[in-house]
């Protein structure tokens, strides 16, 4: 059982390292965002330049419309092209700002989700599993097997952190509880398909005792 518990500790430490990296990344992104906000406050010339260009083009468009109505000689002036140019100058910067903000928010959200998944797997699976194995509490192990199937948040967290297939892990726990010589082949085949290392070692240990 010692090797199983040691493997669980390794998985916990790996997930804790992911949490630390996620927190570090979020702090760096927060500082980066604050720096960009400070830069925007201290250097707002591009914004005012863009605003000036938009106002200038609006005034120019209105002037040309008025001039066209008064002077029939310029009826062939390409108003449609001028209007399209105005739309491009007006909307391209807006689309760019919206896109960059969404991209930053998407990265931040992804990091936060992975951090939450790692915490969930540690708190709701590995720590209770370690305690149950140390106390040889098979009722608690059965509860964990049920939660892998019934608790969608835990199942998503297990998959998101690449700890294995929740259904296969649940089946492995059930096999461990019901271990018997008649199930030895099933235990061996399941251990070969199992991706989760602590549970793989747990089944191999169960086979030795049969």
Image (tube, grey):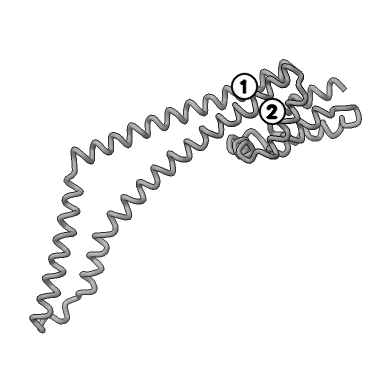
Dot 1 corresponds to which residue? 10
Verify CB contact (< 8 Å) between mark 1 and mark 2.
Answer: yes
Left or right? Give the position of 19 relative to 206.
Answer: left
Q: Quadrant of the C terminus?
A: top right
Which residue is at a point 37% across and 34% down the rendered structure image? 29
Q: Is residue 180 above or below residue 164?
A: above
Q: Quadrant of the N terminus?
A: top right
Left or right? Give the position of 48 relative to 125.
Answer: left
Query: Which mark is first along the chain, 2 or 1?
Result: 1
Which residue is at a point 69% across and 24% down the rendered structure image? 129
Left or right? Give the position of 16 relative to 23.
Answer: right
Residue 169 has which mark? none
User: Residue 41 at x, y = what percent?
Assistant: 21, 39
Q: Is residue 209 above or below residue 37?
A: above
Dot 2 corresponds to which residue? 197
User: Residue 120 at x, y = what percent?
Assistant: 58, 31
Residue at the extreme bottom: 72
* Alpha carbons under labels 1 and 2: distance apart: 10 Å
Dot 2 crowding, Cα within 10 Å, few <14, some 14–19, many 20+: some
User: Residue 126 at x, y = what percent?
Assistant: 64, 26
Image quarter of residue 130: top right
Residue at the extreme right: 182
Q: Is residue 35 above or below residue 140?
A: below
Which residue is at a point 69% across and 26% down the rendered structure image? 198
Which residue is at a point 76% across and 21% down the rendered structure image? 137
Number of numbered discs visible in the structure rendering:
2
Dot 1 crowding, Cα within 10 Å, few <14, some 14–19, many 20+: some
Secondary structure of the residue carrying numbered label 1: helix
Q: Is residue 38 above or below residue 46?
A: above
Secondary structure of the residue carrying numbered label 2: helix
């Amino acid at each position: 059982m010692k090797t199983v518990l040691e493997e669980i500790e390794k998985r916990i430490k790996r997930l804790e390292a992911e949490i630390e990296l996620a927190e570090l990344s979020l702090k760096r992104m927060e500082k980066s965002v604050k720096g960009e906000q400070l830069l925007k406050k201290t250097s707002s010339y591009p914004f005012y330049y863009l605003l000036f260009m938009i106002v200038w083009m609006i005034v120019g468009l209105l002037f040309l419309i008025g001039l066209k109505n008064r002077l029939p000689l310029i009826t062939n002036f390409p108003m449609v092209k001028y209007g399209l140019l105005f739309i491009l100058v007006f909307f391209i910067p807006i689309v760019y700002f919206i896109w960059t903000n969404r991209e930053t928010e998407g990265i931040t959200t992804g990091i936060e989700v992975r951090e939450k998944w790692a915490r969930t797997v540690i708190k709701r699976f590995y720590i209770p599993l370690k305690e149950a194995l140390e106390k040889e509490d098979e009722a608690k192990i059965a509860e964990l097997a049920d939660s892998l199937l019934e608790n969608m948040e835990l199942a998503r967290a297990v998959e998101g952190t690449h700890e294995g297939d929740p259904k296969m892990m649940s089946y492995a726990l059930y096999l461990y509880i019901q271990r018997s010589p008649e199930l030895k082949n099933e235990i061996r085949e399941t251990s070969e398909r199992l991706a989760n290392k602590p549970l793989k070692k747990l089944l191999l240990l169960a086979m030795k005792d049969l």
